[in-house]
Amino acid sequence: MVKILVFSIIFLSLTIMGCIYRAIKGPSSTDRLIAINVIGTKTIILILMVSFILHETYFVDVALVYALISFIASVVISNYIESLGGKSR
């Protein structure tokens, strides 16, 4: 079971690299925002997988706080993009 989780962590880390590329080179600010949200979601999953591997329950609290901060940040950035009129960079 641990080997599967380690493989999944490696795979998710590689897909996060693709999302980082999309966040930097995205054609529009909306694409960048979606890429950042996907990075946040995958990071939460990685934290939970590490929590399961290490048998540490406090990582679940860390993941919940990270999810809350990620949600608030995406709302703030969405409002900022809307105030700009949705213009691309």
Image: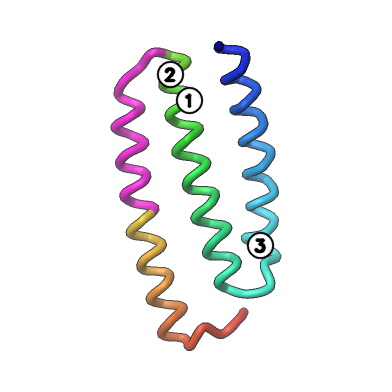
Callout 2: few (<14), some (14-19), or many (20+) C-alpha neighbours within 10 Å? some
Residue 57 in the image: x percent, y percent?
A: 31, 20
| Residue with the mark numbered 1 | 49
Which type of secondary structure does the marked residue at label 2 adopt? Answer: helix
Q: Badge 3 is on which residue?
A: 24
Task: Please give the name of the residue rendered at 57% of the width and 20% of the height, measured from the top-left corner.
Answer: 5
Q: Could you tell me which secondary element the residue under label 1 belongs to?
A: helix
Query: Within the image, what quadrant is residue 16 found in?
Result: top right
Q: Is residue 60 above or below residue 39?
A: above
Tell me the kind of residue under disc 3. Ile
Rendering coords of residue 89 (x, y %): 62, 79
In the rendered structure, the answer to whether residue 21 lies left or right of residue 66 reads right
- The answer to which image quadrant residue 61 occupies is top left
Circles 2 and 1, Cβ within 8 Å, touching? The answer is: yes
Q: Quadrant of residue 79?
A: bottom left
The residue drawn where x is 66% and y is 62% is 24
Tell me the number on the disc at residue 52. Answer: 2
Magenta residues, start to end: 55-70
Q: Residue furthest bottom?
A: 85
Q: Earlier in the sequence, mark 3 or mark 1?
A: 3
Check disc 1: other Cα within 10 Å, few if <14, some if 14-19, many if 20+: some
The quadrant of the rendering that contains the N terminus is top right
| Spatial separation of the CA atoms under disc 3 and disc 1 | 27 Å
> Is 57 colored magenta in this rendering?
yes
Tag nearer the camera, 2 or 3: 2
